[in-house]
Image (cartoon, rainbow, N blue to C red):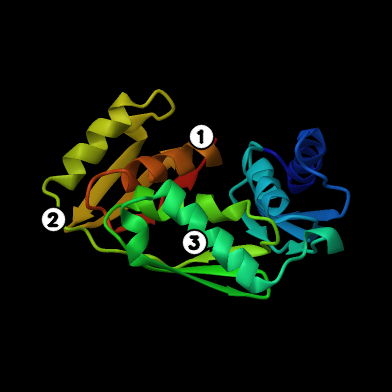
């Protein structure tokens, strides 16, 4: 098992290795396998990429992202302009369901409100506005309200786990209560844990996933 100092070394190396990330102002600390990222980046996408890079490192149990986004003057924009672009992005990516969503912008931070029938619509909405020029962060509070309650969610998720080449379905258990799902078990990496959660969210009608999966290489 890796020590905290070894994990910290590997996270720093992964940040430097990523060609799309300027990590010179990012600080890394590790305690009991939990990585804390601090400092600042010059874009919101860099902040997210730094978090993704840390999660890729073996031995990482969790990541606390405290990075601040400090936009260069050339990238700063008035909130109304950001809001207009965000609405346009939602219309482009979600031509049917965007009408049930609302965009609020304050100091460069976008808050997404409203409702969606499927989890993919909620995640697509967030992805659509992340890269808009001037955005410092995104808060996604869109609520899931399935038009039809699904049946046998547990079986569908288990079958999806078995189809996935990235998951060992025998190490994960699924509990379903209505539209809410609880995942338990052990996986070998943080990325495998995230994949299990992603697959569970993809099941029709799921409104909540509680991920209790433990990373134990």
Relative height, residue 78 to residue 48 (above, below): below
Relative height, residue 67 to residue 186 (above, below): below
* Residue assigned mark 1: 188
SS state under label 2: loop
Q: Residue furthest left?
A: 151
Q: Distance between the residues labelled 3 and 2?
A: 27 Å
Residue in the image at 65% along x and 72% along y? 79
Please tell me whether mark 3 or mark 2 is closer to you in this view.
3
Which quarter of the rendered picture does the C terminus lie within? top right
Reading the chain from its start, which is encountered first: label 2 or label 1?
2
SS state under label 3: helix
Please tell me whether mark 2 or mark 1 is closer to you in this view.
2
Residue 110: image x %, image y %? 57, 67
* Residue assigned mark 3: 87
Q: Which one is in front, 38 or 84?
A: 84
* Residue assigned mark 2: 148
Q: Is residue 209 visible?
A: no
């Amino acid at each position: 098992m890796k020590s905290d100092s070894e994990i910290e070394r590997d996270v720093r190396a992964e940040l430097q290795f990523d060609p799309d990330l300027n990590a010179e102002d990012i600080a890394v600390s590790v305690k009991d396998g939990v990585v804390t990222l601090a400092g600042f980046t010059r874009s919101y996408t860099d902040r997210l990429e730094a978090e993704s890079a840390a999660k890729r490192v073996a031995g990482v149990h969790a990541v606390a992202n405290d990075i601040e986004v400090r936009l260069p003057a050339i990238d700063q924009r008035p909130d109304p302009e950001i809001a207009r672009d965000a609405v346009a992005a939602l219309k482009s990516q979600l031509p049917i369901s965007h009408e049930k969503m609302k965009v609020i912008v304050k100091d460069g931070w976008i808050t997404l409100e409203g409702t969606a029938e499927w989890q993919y619509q909620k995640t697509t909405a967030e992805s659509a506005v992340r890269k808009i020029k001037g955005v410092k962060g995104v808060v996604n509070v869109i609520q899931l309200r399935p038009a039809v309650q699904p049946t046998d969610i547990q079986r569908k998720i288990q079958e999806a786990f078995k189809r996935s080449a990235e998951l060992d379905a025998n190490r994960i258990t699924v509990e379903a209560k209505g539209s809410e799902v609880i995942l338990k078990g052990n996986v070998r990496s943080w990325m495998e844990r995230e994949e299990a959660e992603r697959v569970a969210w993809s099941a029709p009608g799921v409104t909540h996933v509680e991920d209790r999966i433990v990373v134990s290489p």
